Image (tube, rainbow, N blue to C red):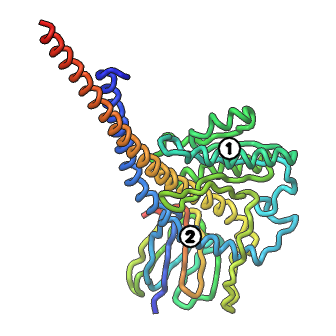
Amino acid sequence: MASLKELKLRINSVKSTQKITKAKQMVAAAKLRKAQAAAEAARPYAARLAGVMGSLAGKVTVSGSSPKLLAGTGKDQVHLLVVANSDRGLCGAFNSNIVKAAKVKATELQAEGKTVLFYLVGRKGRAQIRRDWPNAIIGQFDTTGVREPGFTEAEAIANELLGLFEAGKFDVAHLFYSKFRSALVQVPTAQQIIPVPAPAAAATDDGAVVEYEPDEETILVELLPRYLRTQLFGALLENMASEQGASMTAMDNATRNAGELINKLTIQYNRSRQAAITTELIEIIAGAEAL
Amino acid sequence: MPLHFELVTPAKLVRSESVHMVVVPGSEGEFGVLEGHAPFMSTVKDGVIRVYKSENAAPEDIAVSGGFAEVGANGLTVLAEHVEG
């Protein structure tokens, strides 16, 4: 049985932990609202661009002369896994879920005899991936100095990826991030980003002939990197919202668990205190009787 | 009949309003869009979009870069990566 003092210290320590988790939960709730709003605001652009890409892709046939971003390099040997994580912990299994999804894919690809490389966004997944693939990380994008991922970051990441692609460092790129369903549910998602998968041709034939300036192919070449940037941006926003959601749920659980633990410890503390008092009384009475 | 004009960036919907005319710096030359323009798609040079609220109003300038313009049945939509002003 722990002594009274030990119990008291223990209760205090759990209480301060609970304070931290409670604060983090509230912060996450506030940030979640903001992240959701940001994700919502980004939707019109992504939807329009996807629409335009869809109608263009329906007009341009993929051939050897098509831009590499659409047609690929013609090989399927080197796969780059872009893993988007967060910079902070205290968000439950959020980061490890994404990393786990990436690891499964990497193992699968390796079993097929492909080469796997990693590009990491955010700080958290690094150690876990380095443990299994110590030499496969070819790049990392640091987001520690950024409060909210913006389009500037997406642009920087996309440009770096495009540079690597043009240098022939990889053939196919997959993006791993967490899709936001609700504060309770985040789905780790894998998505191929390079070569750009042709969006489903939208059936927007309203009879009118659309004029293109310059021609379809040139527009497509120009739009492809933009599409990539938008997708990355969308993924960053989803990730942000997911992180806050996961954090909120995890911290809610932690706060509740801490509360339960405090109750249990308090009962134990009171019992031992009572026991101590009883023993003392018995001792006094016994002493008095002996006289 | 006014023209419906939308300006969208990745971060948000910047404009969605009815205007008289918009002059867009297309990559193959400037073009003005009025109501009832034929369906049209063009890339946009980094430059200034001029928005004429009504026929005689002074134009409002919006600087954009990384843009793309689409004219369809529901008006003019400009997608731009960066917008100033």
Q: Secondary structure at mark 2?
A: strand
Using the image, name the chain to which the residue with label 1 belongs: A
Whole-percent x, y for residue A239 in the image: 55, 53
Q: Position of residue A203 (x, y in %)?
A: 69, 83
Q: Nearer the viewer, residue A17 or A201?
A: A17
Tell me which amino acid carries mark 2: Leu
Between A208 and A288, the one lying in front of the other is A288
Q: Quadrant of residue B47?
A: bottom right
Report which residue position mark 1 lands on: A119
Looking at the rendering, in which quadrant would you find the C terminus of chain A? top left
Q: Which mark is residue A185?
A: none
Q: Is residue A36 visible?
A: yes
**Chain under disc 2:** B
| Residue A100 point in image, percent of width and height | 66, 45
Amino acid type, residue under disc 1 in the picture: Tyr
In percent of width and height, residue B62 lies at 46, 68
Above or below A267: residue B24: below
Tell me the mark number nearer the camera, choosing from 2 and 1.
Answer: 1
